[in-house]
Image (cartoon, rainbow, N blue to C red):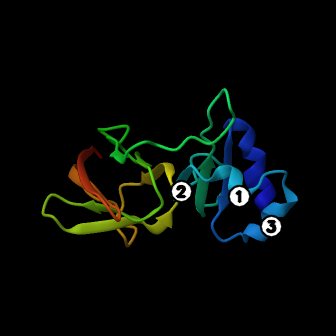
């Protein structure tokens, strides 16, 4: 199962894609290590990238390195970026910079202020991260077209941004 995901790796430079339910131990069969992929972490659905019938959750890791030194880059300040694309259908990417390790919580709210989804609730190391929202609530139901807000909470910061879903 891991092999079919890694075969698709050739489509994306510097990316490693693997299902969440595969034990990290199984990755020892590859020349890559988890430590090489700490800077971008993404949850989502892999259907659009694979030609299989799988709709497995996945994790996406990407290296961010300084071109001259080859060392991982660490953001200087906390920053929540505007989602892209915005307007979106069926999914959008939310990125942020985390200058130090912290517990984070990435949430989606509707216009009434009701939390409809939690994309992440985890402890992360310093780095640049991306999360993909598929326009669905926590029960997997498609949300209607409209304005939504995403909120990122860390140990030191809280930021909101607006996004627009168009069905």
Q: Earlier in the sequence, mark 2 or mark 3?
A: 3
Between 58 and 104, the one lying in front of the other is 104
Q: Earlier in the sequence, mark 1 or mark 3?
A: 3
To which residue does mark 2 refer? 45
Seen at 25% across and 44% down, the residue is 164
Label 3 crowding class (10 Å Cα cut-off): few <14, some 14-19, many 20+? few
To which residue does mark 3 refer? 26
Q: Earlier in the sequence, mark 2 or mark 1?
A: 1
> Which label was assigned to residue 21?
none
Viewer-side label of 2, 3:
3
Q: For residue 108, what is the image quadrant?
A: bottom left
- Give me the C-alpha separation between circle 1 and circle 3: 11 Å
Seen at 51% across and 49% down, the residue is 127
> Is label 1 in a helix, a strand or a loop?
helix
Viewer-side label of 1, 3:
1
Seen at 63% across and 67% down, the residue is 20
Q: Position of residue 153 (x, y in %)?
A: 31, 62
Label 2 crowding class (10 Å Cα cut-off): few <14, some 14-19, many 20+? some
**Residues tagged 2 and 1 counted as in contact (Cβ below 8 A):** no
To which residue does mark 1 refer? 34
**Residues tagged 1 and 3 counted as in contact (Cβ below 8 A):** no
**Residues tagged 2 and 3 counted as in contact (Cβ below 8 A):** no
């Amino acid at each position: 199962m891991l092999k079919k995901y890694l075969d698709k790796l050739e489509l994306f430079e510097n990316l490693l894609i693997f299902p969440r339910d595969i034990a990290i131990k199984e990755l020892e069969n590859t020349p890559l290590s988890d430590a090489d992929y700490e800077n971008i972490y993404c949850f989502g659905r892999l259907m659009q990238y694979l030609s299989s019938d799988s709709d497995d959750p996945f994790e996406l890791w990407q290296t961010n390195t300084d071109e001259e030194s080859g060392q991982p880059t660490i953001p200087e300040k906390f920053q929540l970026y505007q989602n892209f694309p915005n307007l979106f259908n069926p999914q959008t990417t939310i990125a942020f910079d985390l200058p130090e390790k912290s517990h984070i919580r990435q949430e989606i709210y509707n216009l009434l202020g009701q939390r409809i989804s939690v994309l992440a609730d985890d402890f992360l190391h310093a780095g640049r991260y991306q999360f993909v929202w598929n326009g669905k609530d926590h029960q997997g139901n498609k949300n209607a077209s409209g304005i939504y807000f995403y909120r990122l909470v860390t140990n030191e910061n809280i930021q909101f941004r607006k996004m627009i879903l168009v069905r």
